[in-house]
Amino acid sequence: MARLFCLDSVMIDIVLRVGELPARGGDVLASEQLVTTGGGFNAMSAASRQGMTTVYAGRLGVGPFSDLARRSLDAEGIAAPVEPDHDRDLGTCVVLLEPDGERTFVTTPGAEATLRPRHLDTLGIRDGDVLLVSGYNVMYPELAEIVLGWISTLEGVVVAFDPATRMIDIPASNLATMLARADWLLCNRSEAAQLTGVTSGIAAAVKLREQFGQGVVVRQGGEGCVVASSSIAPTDVAPFLTHVVDLNGAGDVHNGVMLAELNRGADPLSAAQRANAAAAMAVATLGPASGPTREELDNWLAS
C-alpha cells in the first residue's frame, strides 16, 4: 500500500484551557494545561492509527521539545528520516482553549523551519505515495520556494492540500500553484468561502470542483462535511453527535483518516463518513492528537 508523507511541520503544543481570552495587558488563570506534540503530528497519528504507513517529511531538532516529538513519532510507528537540525530545538504553539472548544494560537518557529531541498531529496517518495501539504508549507517565502519546487518534480504522487487557518496569508501565486497541483483539497467551510466567495459548503464544493477538477472535502464541524470528486457530485456527509471538549486538531484527524481510508480503497463518501466519526471522537478529548485507532473507531461506529 502507498505511504503517507506529511510536510506539515511537527511542533510542540502548549494547551491552556481558559474561561475567556485575556484583555490586552490582562491576565487569566488557566484551569488545565497540556504540553504535547502537535502540528503535522495530528494528521500523521490519525492516519497511522488507521493502519497507513506514515512518514514525517519535515525536520526535527535537538533539545527537550524535539525529544518529546521523537518519542511521540516513535510511539505511533511514524518514520522521521530527515537529518535533525543540531543547532536548535523545535518551535512551539501556545493554544488558548475556550469553553466552547474554540482555540487561539501563538506560534514561534524552530528547527522545523530549517527544511532544505537536500532533505526532501533523501525521502525516497515514489509513484502512488500520498503527500499531505499544509498552507503553512507554502506561506513563508523561503520554505514555499523549496516545497513548491520539489512538488513540481513529483510524478504519480497523490498530493493532498489543506490550506489551514492562515490561508489569507498565503501569496496568491503560491496558493494558485498548490490548488492546480492538488489531487485533493481538504479545507474547512471558512477556507472554502475565502476561495470561492460563497458560504454554503455544497456551493463552494461545486465551484472548487469546476475550477480545479480535483477531489474536494469541505469540513463543516458539527454539520459533517461535503465531498466532491470527478465522479461524485457535491454531497453532504452527515455528522455524528458528540460532546465538544477541544476542537484543536479535529481537522487534522479528519484529514488523516480520510486519506488512510482512500488509500485502503474506500470510496470518498465512505471515507468521509469514517473521518467524520473519528473527528467526533477526537473533539471529545483534550489535546490535538486524539484520533482513534481503527479498532476504536469500528467499535464506536458499531455502538
Image (spheres, helix red, strand yellow):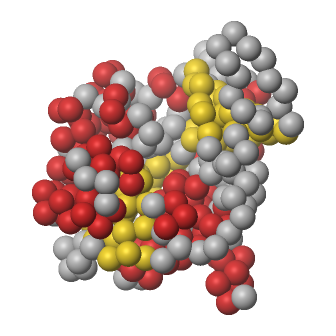
Residue in view at x 68 percent, y 69 percent: 242
Look at the picture and state if 134 lies above or below 131: above
All told, the count of numbered labels is 0
The reply to whether residue 78 is in sight is no
Look at the picture and state if 210 lies above or below 169: below
Image quadrant holding the N terminus, namely bottom left
Look at the picture and state if 208 lies above or below 180: below
The reply to whether residue 210 is in sight is yes
Residue in view at x 59 percent, y 75 percent: 240
Where is residue 154? Give x, y as percent: 24, 50
Where is residue 29? Give x, y as percent: 84, 27
Tell me where residue 168 sits by quadrant. top left
The answer to which of 122 and 151 lies nearer the viewer is 151
Left or right side of 53 for 217 = left
Image quadrant holding the C terminus, namely bottom right
Tell me where residue 131 sits by quadrant. bottom left
Tell me where residue 143 sits by quadrant. top left
Left or right side of 136 for 72 = right
The answer to which of 149 and 174 lies nearer the viewer is 174
Left or right side of 129 for 271 = right
Look at the picture and state if 209 lies above or below 12: below
Where is residue 203? Give x, y as percent: 24, 63
Residue in view at x 36 percent, y 37 percent: 167
The answer to which of 179 and 23 lies nearer the viewer is 23
Q: Residue farthest to the top?
A: 25
Q: Residue farthest to the bottom?
A: 302
Where is residue 229? Give x, y as percent: 25, 72
Q: Residue farthest to the left?
A: 211
